[in-house]
Image: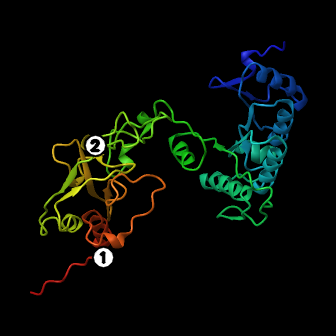
Amino acid sequence: MLDLPRRRFELLGAWGICFGPAWATSIVDLVEPAQTASRRGFNRLTVGEYHNDALSWLHVLASATDRVRLATTILNVHLRHPAVVAEGVAAIRDVWGDRIELGLGLGHRSNVTDEFGLPYEASPNYLQEYAEAIRHLLNGESYTGQHLRSKLALQRRRATRGSPPILIAALGPKAVDRAASYADGTPMAADASSHMDWSQALAFQGAQLEISPTTAAYSDIDGHQVNSPERRQPLGAFTLFNFSAKIDPVATMLVQNHRDVIPDFYGLTTSFRRDRLKPSVSVLADETNAPWVKLVHGERGQGTWTYYGGHDPEDPQHQIGDPPTDLSLHPHSPGYRLILNNVLFPAAKKKELKT
């Protein structure tokens, strides 16, 4: 049996092998190692791209195996137009099915400019547009962005599979945050909470992010945790604070209502824990004796912001797929009145006082 020494491959978690330049000078040399890895229970084989064509390597690995998932880690976006990549991905999936994952990255500047003589686009927007373009093309749509465009959409019969999972190579906290907004299956680091820069947040501080993919929550900011059965808190009612129009005119407008106590309602974020709020945040509504609040407000620069927890004031238990609320049936909804206040108050103008 072929020996697979640890020094010659990188383990991805406990499941995959990444084939790098130390493996072989020819793709033919990878066939036997790939088959051996598949027999030993690995479920993912990935290929880097240095002076090789990663998509061609995936074709060969797919032909040599029958169950493992295949991915590029990474495919250099500077070396091909996204339409060419989309066509290559579609061809692999036509022959070998939905086994491919597409890893994209900007690559090294020296590799792109010195070795290939191509211009290097370091903007993170370029990488995002590249991923978006591939998704559009593989769904049978053309694409136009700031950096990239293509009117050559794949034929509809080729686009029925849609786009495979797209993985993004990112270094540094900001790049990772950006990649997570459009990449597929991006796992969170175990110490993700320690990397948060809460000075950039409007309202919150010191929160712990939820890193488990099996827990339907973003963080511990929400006090109700509606989608986590072991954490879910029952609904109560929240009370609007009274403010002086002379001292706090904006807060007064935001809580203007015909009711002071309003039944609570769930949402992905139903409420905000008090101990996660910054000291500068103004609380406009809360639940009596509860460790959470419902409506908060603050200022940033020359503007203001308001956070209102919950999803639908007139459908407290709203579920995915439920029909939208008919607002004509709730002309005097106190919950929706708070939303309307937030929309209208920026248009309010101070009247000039005559002297």
Label drawn at residue 250 = none
**Position in image of residue 246 (x %, y %):** 12, 69
Q: Dot 2: few (<14), some (14–19), or many (≥20) neighbours within 10 Å?
A: few
Q: Is residue 80 visible?
A: no
State the residue in front, 237 or 49.
Answer: 237
Q: Give how far across and how far down residue 302 sits, in percent.
A: 32, 65
Q: Please indicate, yes or no, whether residue 10 appears anywhere in the rendered image.
A: yes
Query: How far, Cα to Cα, is label 2 from label 1?
Result: 36 Å
Q: Secondary structure at mark 1?
A: helix
The kind of residue tagged 1 is Ala
Percent position (x, y) of residue 13?
Answer: 62, 25
Q: Amino acid at mark 2?
A: Pro
Labels 2 & 1 near each other (Cβ < 8 A): no
Quarter of the figure with residue 304: bottom left
- Name the residue rendered at 30%, 47% in the picture: 272
Vertical placement of residue 129 versus 187, above or below: below
Mark 1 sits on what residue? 347
Q: Disc 2 marks which residue?
A: 234
Q: Quadrant of the N terminus?
A: top right
Residue that appears at 55% across and 45% down: 180
